[in-house]
Amino acid sequence: MPTCTSSSTPLIYYIGTGGIYNFDPTLAISSTNPSLNSIVPPSGAEGISVNANLNAASPSPTFYVVDGSIDYEYYNGTVWVNTGFNAGDVNPGGGGGYIFSLVGATGDIWRFDGIANATLITTVSSFNTGGPYDVQGDCAGNFYILRMETTAYLEEYNSSGTLIHSWACSGQTSTSAGGGFAIIGNHVYANNTSGFWDGVITGTNVAFSLVTASGLSNNPEDFGTCPVGASRSLNDTSFYCGMGAGTTLTANGAGPFTWSVVYGPAVITGAGASVTVTASSTSLITVLDSNTNGCGISLDSTLLVVPTATVNAGFPDHLVGCGTFNDLLNGSLTNTIPWLTYNISWSPVATINSGRNTLNPSVSPASNTVYHIVVSTPANEGACSWQDSVLITTVDTSVHAGYSYIVKYGCHGDTVMFTNTTTRALYYKWVFADGSIDTATNPTHIFVNQGIYNVILYSKNPICNDSNTQAINLLHPLHASYTTDKDSICQGGQVAFTNTSITTVRNGISPSYYWSYSDGTSDVTTNTVHTFTEPGLYKVMLAVADFVPCYDTVYHIIEVDSLPYISFTISDSVFCQGKGITFTGNYLNEGNTGLIWSFGDNENTTIFDRNPVDHAYDVPGTFTIKFVSDYRFCPDTSVTKTIQVNAYPTINLGPDTVMCPNAAPITLVDNVNANNAGATWLWSTGETTPSILIKAPGTYYATVTLGGCSASDSVNVLKDCYIDIPNAFTPNGDGINDYFLPRPLLSRGLTSFSMKIFDRWGELLFETTNIDGRGWDGKFNNVLQPQGVYVYMIDVSFYNGVAEHFNGNVTLMH
């Protein structure tokens, strides 16, 4: 059975291969340490805890294990008893009336109170398989978990799962899962896959060292040990500076507590859980927790008296510089304890560059400065404090370069007079940014060109130097310029002049302006409007004067066109339909940009840029002719005239007619206009009457004039009552004179006809009475007759009753 009394040796119990093993961490690992416990665990047991009996009055303390069903079983001194309550997980550890179990994969913590299933009280999410998978309880009902994997820690929680304290771990190999851990006094013992480890709790750290890489024998699966007994509020080692009211030691546990001095000149004041201890040198204090519930153990605390440290801030220093001073302080600290923490702090902070918490800080005093060094130990190491100071003096030999200047402006260069205002300097160099330099104290310099000059003054003494750069604005541009709303106008027009000159105002003096219009007039306003009353080219000048004064002028040409005129003439005074008319324009050609003629009869008959121009009207009527002349500067001008276009008269002399020789005269008359009193006639016979009498065949013409427009007609009077007989013909088939006597062409007015053809021997060769026939084709019995002379006999009658007989010869020619 486990023993947890103040007189017993604290053992680590673990379940491994073959059973429960006892291990004394105060002894070396050997063939007999660890040793097999006589109590055989139940089948499937995985985790083990040493704890006050929560389910029976005795035995107590006893073993608790977690079986294969994740239920708690406890050993009653003879057999294992199943509590019937679920443990939550297989990694138990208890104390203070509880058994806690850890789920390694999640960090879940379960709490068992002996009367019901374990309940989940918190999750330590940072554990996250950090290992070893085990939990340790203490007599106050708190529990501890150890994570040896990065980031490693030992953490203490109260019974509700609230974090109370945390120690960082160092020295261990990062590993997960495996084995278990136990806290005995100020040691933390752990076994995992990387070996068996011994850690010492000091302040806020657990420093691990490897005992054996092979670990404890028989593959430990889980550790169990007596609950952690009484403990100090800070650590197992307390510090005292050897002065003052002393240091307070506090034990956590059920009590009652018995405090005593093991060795050293320590004096304990008070009783109970907290006491006050003073000492003049190192002492060992022990406290006994008499609790019988498995926690009756004693713990020791070492009280260390911290010796007075010797602090030296270093030797005073004297700094000579150029406004900025840098120094390295040489503090020292002696009569110290190597394992004690000494905190160093210098002030004033404002002028410390770096190393404030070292013995040799870098400082930059702006003036004479006393630097203080304070060396102290932490509150958990006695809160001791020692200090010293050192004076650092400074002498400022810095140069402050500066200057002022006065500018005298000119038209062909500006003169600048410089006044040096530098302090503590002996040597000077001026750089004027125009390629020249000077070493005089107060130079005068002429800048030929306008501009902004970054003038640099370099000043120095044997130790320090400085420079001053000023931008000297010598820009006072003068450039005469102006724009116009137009540069070409018509006579009498206005031009607006806008002054765009570039000028500079200095000393409240604004620029002045003078305008000359080249027509004998002028103006002095900034912007102006001028009327040009005469045509011509005008050279307009603007003169500008600035504050110096300097002058500039600019010229522009203004072109003024004459006022235009326009008219046109027409080639006729009488206008007839369809008769061409010539229009001639008269206009100012200077500045003309185009001509437009429109005749008022059709929109599509507009004619551009032609003069003179011809036009004829297709229909009679009243028409307005418009002539437009466009000008580049002057307004477009136009003129219109209206004309009356008369239609041509119609004249009709009737159809062609015939008359017989020696017949009565016939009358030819204008059948359309004979009764129009406004008409006049002219016949081809010279007569001027509406009608005439003709006595002979021929072609007769008549011209009628009405409203100034004339029209003509003609009539053919043909000879009638006759016959024409040719004296030869050529029946060769060429289409010319192939027949003798073709009556439709050779006779007029026939009513009957008879023709006979005889050869010279009197034989009848051809005979016809057909008025519309073609005549003789020179053949007899369809045979062309020989060339020669033949006799014809012709008898005809005319429509006027006259009959005639004709005899004669006709020559047939081949």
Image: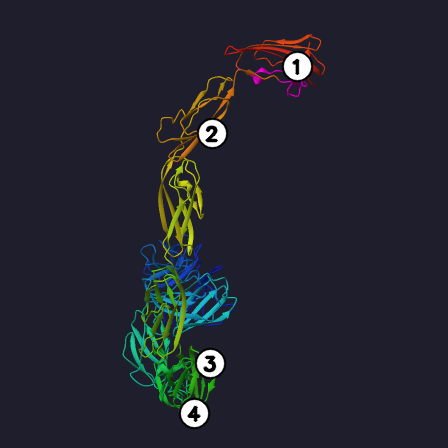
- Residue 223 placement (x, y as % from top left): 43, 63
| Mark 3 in CB contact with mark 4 (< 8 angstroms) | no
Residue picked out by circle 4: 426
Mark 2 or mark 4: name the one nearer the start of the chain. 4
Q: Tag on residue 152?
A: none
| Mark 4 in CB contact with mark 1 (< 8 angstroms) | no
Q: Magenta residues?
A: 726-748
Distance of label 4 from label 1 (alpha carbons): 158 Å
| Mark 3 in CB contact with mark 1 (< 8 angstroms) | no
Residue picked out by circle 1: 809
Mark 1 or mark 2: name the one nearer the start of the chain. 2
- Of circles 3 and 4, the one toward us is 3
Classify mark 4: residues with Cα within 10 Å, few (<14), some (14-19) or many (20+): few
Q: Which quarter of the rendering shows the N terminus?
A: bottom left
- Of circles 4 and 1, the one toward us is 1
Classify mark 3: residues with Cα within 10 Å, few (<14), some (14-19) or many (20+): some
| Mark 2 in CB contact with mark 4 (< 8 angstroms) | no
Eyeballing the image, is 308 above or below 155?
Answer: below
- In front of the other: 456 or 667: 667
Eyeballing the image, is 129 above or below 320?
Answer: above
Q: Tag on residue 684?
A: 2
Name the residue at 34% across, 54% down: 117
Mark 3 or mark 2: name the one nearer the start of the chain. 3
Query: Does residue 115 appear left or right of residue 778 in this picture?
Result: left
Name the residue at 72% across, 14% down: 786
Could you say which quadrant of the image residue 298 lies in? Answer: bottom left
Distance of label 2 from label 4 (alpha carbons): 132 Å
Q: Tag on residue 434?
A: 3
